[in-house]
Amino acid sequence: MGTNGVLQVTDSRTGCSYELPITDGAIRAIDLRQVKVSEDDFGLLCYDPAFLNTASCRSAITFIDGDKGILRYRGYPIEELAGHASFLDVAYLLLHGELPGKEESEAWTREITHHTFVHENVKKFIDGFHHDAHPMGILVSTVAALSTFYPEAKAVADQAIQRDQMVRLIAKMPTLAAFAYRHAMGLPYAYPDDELSYAGNFLNMMWKMTEPRYSPDPVLEHALDALFILHADHEQNCSTSAMRVVGSSQVDPYSAAAAAAAALYGPLHGGANEQVLRMLQEIGSVDNIPAYIARAKRGELRLMGFGHRVYKNFDPRATIIKEIADSVFAVTGRNPLLDIALELERIALADEYFISHKLYPNVDFYSGIIYQAMGFPVSMFPVLFAIGRMPGWLAQWHESAADPEQKIARPRQIYVGEGLRHLNGTIS
Ligand code: SDX
């Protein structure tokens, strides 16, 4: 079926007919404005709360087919990238459109590694948070704070300057994340070790104690690198849309990334992996699963880690994460919550409510179980998601800034409020 053609519409209010061009399976919303009931009519709007059926952009970065469970970064299937490419090479792919060659990869890794330190004043900023401050609250704040250390980032049209900022953001996310954790634990900050890989260095900054040099477990290092890849981009999800919308005001990328991280923090989005663990802990035993599922079916709660706006079949990332779990548990020991998760998935996928609502495990359903087995506290789970998603946010922001069709985002509304009225002494 061709994705181009013409949509013929007739307005029953006037009897007028219109031809709307169809391009790539879409009509341009602005073409609806010609549909009027009078000359001074503003023209027809399309009303789409939560943008269920609205394409906000044309993008060449990530392709998802929700019915077929397909996810590709720049055309490469996620199954081929996860566990075979490195996270930094996938970040390079998202940003540049091609995987780096050997020399490019080595230069890119050196460049990222060179920027893992943060200004010492950032520590003072983090020290101001309560010991029990949620690390996502610290991360959102410190990412925004980076904009004050690099004022040149306001030159959003300068490609060389913006490349430096994107390198800094990818490089510093693990440092900010680990510093947030160390602050919460009352531990001294562990500085980056340039001899380690991206994931290995993050584990170093998280777990290093009195040993002269931290040596990451290679299985856990590889598993974390693969998990970062699985989270690297996901087309126009809530946080990426926030990155694009906030970035459309031509604010610096640190401020836009802080807005994206704030959106990711929500329990319906990147905060879901934290909620999945809390849900599994609340269920506590496989015996309690039927009653919990019954509550979800009554609408009393949501089965966290289930469902997706796009995937109406399995989330390919969930499938890969289940495979990664086996390698992690071989090192850490099996997480008993896995048994509850597997039984919950088995029962839910056989239940008519979940089948009819096309609710399958998503990327968040199993990731938290692995993170917990690796020793991360539940509150760090969305922070790990944010580390992985940073290259995707930046690639989407960069693509939007270069798109000649884009301008500052400013949706319309349908006003349903009061008509004109006057004070007439109402205020005494
Ligand atoms: C991520 O967009 C992305 O790409 C996101 C992400 C990415 O990589 O960026 O993939 C990452 O955010 C994954 C999703 C993590 N969130 C959760 O696991 C939270 C639980 N899931 C949901 O809240 C929900 O499924 C969403 C938010 C993920 C999707 O919501 P939709 O598409 O807006 O669907 P909906 O809320 O309109 O629900 C449709 C129906 C409703 O029932 P009815 O009112 O029509 O009878 O399905 C029900 C919902 O009640 N439903 C669920 C459910 N999810 C939807 N019922 C029980 N448990 C659930 N998890």
Image: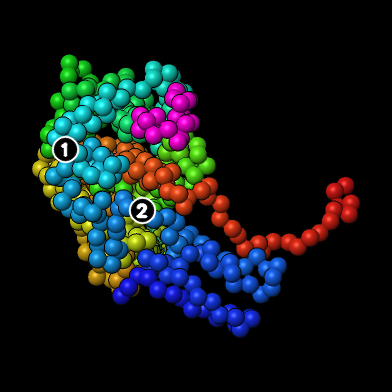
Magenta segment, which residues?
A: 147-165
Q: Is residue 311 magenta?
A: no
Front one among 336 and 303: 303
Q: Is residue 364 above or below residue 420?
A: above
Residue holding disc 1: 101
Q: Residue at x 63, y 72 (%)?
A: 36
Evaluate whether residue 54 shows in this view.
yes
Occupied quadrant, residue 421: bottom right
Please state which amino acid type lies under the numbered disc 2: Ser
Q: Is residue 163 magenta?
A: yes
Residue 85, x across and y down, in percent: 16, 43
Q: Does ligand 1 reach within 8 Å of label 1's beta carbon?
A: no
Q: Residue at x 45, y 67 (%)?
A: 27
Query: How would you rate the neighbour count of disc 2 (Cα within 10 Å): few for under 14, some for 14-19, many for 20 or more?
Result: some
Marks 1/2: CA–CA distance: 24 Å
Please state which amino acid type lies under the numbered disc 1: Gly
Q: Is residue 15 above or below residue 131?
A: below
Q: Residue at x 32, y 19 (%)?
A: 188
Evaluate whether residue 200 shows in this view.
no
Residue 157, x across and y down, in percent: 45, 36
Residue holding disc 2: 59
Query: How would you rate the neighbour count of disc 1 (Cα within 10 Å): few for under 14, some for 14-19, many for 20 or more?
Result: few
Q: Earlier in the sequence, mark 1 or mark 2?
A: 2
Residue 130, x across and y down, in percent: 45, 27
Front one among 173 and 346: 173
Query: Viewed as shown, does residue 325 lie left or right of 368?
Result: left
